[in-house]
Amino acid sequence: MAEKMKLSLNVNGQARTLDVWPMARLLDVIREDLHLTGTKEGCGEGECGACSVILDGKLVNSCLIPAVQAEGGELCTIEGVASEEQLHLVQESFLHCGGAQCGICTPGMVMAAVDLLHRCPQPDEAQIRDGLAGNLCRCTGYVKIVDSVADAAERALQVAKESRS
Amino acid sequence: MKGQAPSCTVHTPASLVGALEILFAEKGTWRPLAGGTDLMVPFAAGTLPFTRFLNLWGLDELRGIEISPENISLGALTTYADVRSHSLLRAEFPNLVQSARVTGAMAIQNRGTLAGNIANGSPAADTPPSLLAYGAEVQLQSLAGSRWVPYESFHTDYKQTVMLPEELITRIRLPRTTGDTFHFFRKVGTRKAQAISKVCLAAYARAEEGRVAEFRLGMGSVAPVPLRALTTEMLIQGQRLEALDDHSIAEAKQALLEDIRPIDDIRSTASYRRKVSANVLGQLLEAMIERFKRPQIRA
Amino acid sequence: MNPSLHIGHSRIRKEGRAKVTGAAQYTDDVCMSGMLYGATVRSRVARGILKGIEFGEGIPWDEFIIVTAKDVTGDLYVALIEQDQPFLALDRINHPEEPVVLLAHEDRYLLEKARAAVRLIIEPLPPLFDLEESLACREVIWGSDNSFKDILIEQGDVDSVWGAATHIVQGEYKTGAQEQLYIEPNGAIAVAKAEEGVTVWGSLQCPYYVHKALKHLFNLPDEKVRVIQMETGGGFGGKEDYPSLIAGHAALLSLKSGGRPVKIVYDREEDMVATTKRHPSRTRIRSAFDAEGQLLALDIDFALDGGAYLTLTPVVLSRGAIHAGGPYRCPNTRIRARAVATNTPPHGAFRGFGAPQSLFAIERHMNVAAAEMGMDPIALRKQNLLKMGDSTATGQIIKEAIDLPGLLDRALEKLDYTAKQESCRVHNASSSPIKRGVGFASFMHGCGFTGAGESYLASVAGVEGREDGKIHVLAAATEMGQGANTILSQVVAEVLKVPLEYVEVARPDTALVPDSGPTVASRTTMVVGKLVQEAAIGLRQILLQAGFLSEPYAGEAFSNAVKQYLAKNGHLKAYSQYSTPPQIVWDDQNYKGDAYTTFAWACYATEVAVDTRTFEVQVEDFVALQEVGRVLNPTLAEGQIEGGVAQGIGYGLSEQVVWNEGRMANGQMTNYIMATSMDLPRIRVYFEESPYPLGPGGAKGIGELPMDGSAPALLNAIQDALATVTPREIPLTPERLMELVESSNG
């Protein structure tokens, strides 16, 4: 048996230190050690995107990252997307446009959408479909998810306009 | 939880030299770990026969894209996302950019690295055909020094490479493309994203004085290793442009069947791979002929 | 102007906020104190006799809870239709994923090591994997003749027609297995104690199926078994019968551990390989037409591969058989339907439940027939589509004023079919390697249980007034993404004329909610919705009669009335029980009569582009037009159709289960190919609303319909694009299409 490591990272704005196996999957650290169960396991092989989180500003599959590589990192999970009371624009759009059905892909899908809009604030439909291509959804046929992201982008533009005027 | 994390040791070296030292001292016992996108899959499935991992992710010495008049040199840990967003690569090596775009999807592209992609030796990897088409060279480094290996001779057999146990890939170098060039990349995958190639084909050609002065064709998923289709290349290379016609395309498609050795697997069939390789080669050559009808020389 | 308060409005999903924030609790998100993890050791041999179990070295076996068939004190066999599937194999192995040994430990890593260290000694017997070989009884592997069910539907006199027919067209069609591929794998947590009984929390569609299975397994009375549905990440039929096994396994381990909670959650591969998939099928159709294209006779031989145990196969076969004639009028019909055993894991429920298989065959056949007769497939269908007063193959008289030719016209119009077909012709005459084509399919889906199913079930649902003045819906209907929570709330809030926030759906928990039947068969909105609607009317009546409420009232007055009533009487509940409408008559012996109380009707049309270099098919456009009664919540209804079409496109083109010795060889999401966002077009959904008088707010069932028509529409379009090939088998992968093209080229 190998030894556990002290893993220090920032999780949704809070500094955390944990004892973990260095080769434990970041996904398991998030779900079992941090008890943040909004991040889901759908396939365990980087295919479905249900475990998507943002690590050091980049969208990643947490099932493919060994804990050791999160050392010193800045991690944002679905629990860190909304503030206390206020949903993120993307979450609001998913609610209003019907982007969530069974909900199991939704946290990962929201993370991918947040990441996409960060990189590309006004995406066209092709860019949205590319940005979400790593997140499989079995319920929606993606139509309402694509609409949700487009809606969030549109509302972000409105918010920006209003704050300027 | 099939991946036995409690049985595994990870060493995170502070420097490249530190990494090379441990590889040298305990030869063959440490498995290099870069972005993890390939390695973590068999690890989690409990089928990876390694328990000691050398974590290279933090080695910034292995990052960075350097440009000289002759070459562009990519650090081993260059990710697909880095490739996608690099303007010079987009201009001069569009096949490589394309192959990075079609590898997995964004989350994979943020972690997967070029060196990892080739070191694992999967014949279905997406960047190797492009690297072959561009005549890439791979820098292998050990404590004893470094050597440059032409990428076309890097893979020796299914998941086997020329790397010694004490070596790491440090950089990948591509000769700059200039002149009247043609680039072609096509991945025929199981779907449009998050797909493994069934056939992958990348070509680079340069026309000069009415001839095909250079022609390289890299292929994936059609043999135990990513390969250059040398028989086919020989038919095209050196040809006068006006001599290239439907007949030469038919000959080339025939020759390609000599170059490749596809198999049946759970993703496709050997006969499909043969047929589609030949058809896509046809598409490629038609596009090349069309393209070279009017010279376009990049400044 | 919509005069309804809630019906017909796109209300936000009730549990939506919990889902978009990640707060929703799925089975694997629950961790209980002292909890053990459970794992299943499986046979890996397709057929044989279990001779022994060896526990390998290097594992502290004394730390493990170990369960085998010998530990079962109640009924070893899962209580469903027939009791033939064991929870754990005793001596006979009938498929490669047969559960044999259960292990539990608190360390998940060690548990996996242990699972790999168990060795089963199995003496192999000759297995049977092929449907035709099973039909021919090359080996007898189940019962006396491998047959799970044999159905004959007859109308008129088929054999009298062949001589007089102008055209006789025959064809054979095949469909493959399909994996449900809900993104949340199966899982359950159980606490079982000898004195107190069994409680299970799980990802499941049918709490009362699991309840029944556990009662038999542990030989317990109703009240000692409790099943609670957790948030469920998709089901599509795949969490209809298999959760009974997982719940039983977790409970057996818990009981043996002395009552510690035991969690079993499958990883993706175990879920894909071991649990149920859609039944593979083979359909032979012989059809006779007169000179004008009027259908004179249909002789259909429909066969399903049921896998190793009977499970739900007879009812899947039944629905498939009844839908086999399609939405057509045919005076002489014979449908022979058989389901047989093979040594693969049992096939089970998947959205559509037999209908996608037989409708694929008939909808391809209509195009094949049109081509053979030199007729336009649109004209051929229009001549034969059912209308009011016609009868279906079971003799069910269509009593609704349906206009199927009109539905077809409007779907084609939405696609711009005629213009597209013309532009495809022009395009295809060019040298382009991309060939384009258009196609469509007309079809229907019977709503609710087949035949007398609903009257046997006699479902009960209710509503309850709560101390906070809110109303809770009491039903075993499970939310698994389809929107049951929201729809049932809308129906109740509409009746009570209160804001939607006043209504909540109680978590399906067999200790708290009545048995409103399984959440299957497109029955939740239409059947359970009707029951809660009636119950809500009853509850309002109670308040009115008791004088706490007088009409007209506002929402707040209603909620005050509830509080006052409760303060006085202690409880406020109203229930309603299903009774079959008097005009609905079904003869289960002879398969005659009203197979369904109503049908949803549809026509789907699509345009495809086929790359003749790679044989890849791109779906360029897809129109889904349907008549499903009144649409209660447009956003949710569209979502159902869009998702169903996406699954149907996968069924038709890419979702191939690769079999190796009875075992799925491509049990990874990497290798079983469902669509990503890049692969699908923007699916265009249209509803024609014609309120159904017996449904709540005029609604029919909707969930399964979109699974039925997509695959044949696509293949019809591919045939239109390529002209020289006649595809008859799905999934039509690029590899299969290449073979077809090559063989048609000679």
Image (cartoon, helix red, strand yellow):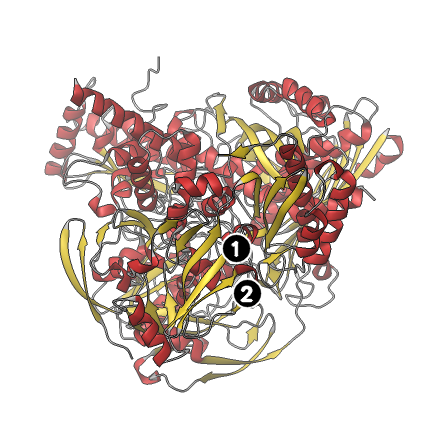
Asked if the residue at tag 2 contacts the one at tag 1, i.e. Cβ–Cβ closer than 8 Å, the answer is: yes
Q: Is residue C703 left or right of residue A103?
A: right
Farthest residue in the bottom direction? C57
Locate residue C117, reporting x and y percent.
43, 80
**Mark 1 — on which chain does it sit?**
B
**C369 versus C77 height, above or below:** above
Q: Earlier in the sequence, mark 1 or mark 2?
A: 1
Residue visible at 43% across and 60% down in the picture: B116
The reply to the same-chain question for discs 1 and 2 is yes
Q: Determine which of the numbered discs, if any, sits on residue B128 in the image.
A: 1
Q: Is residue C454 left or right of residue C46?
A: left
Locate residue C323, reporting x and y percent.
62, 38
Quarter occupied by the N terminus of chain B:
bottom left
User: Is C586 or A88 nearer to us in this picture?
Assistant: A88
Q: CA distance from mark 1 to mark 2?
A: 10 Å
Identify residue type, mark 2: His
Q: Which residue is mark 2?
A: B155
Say whether residue C175 is visible.
yes
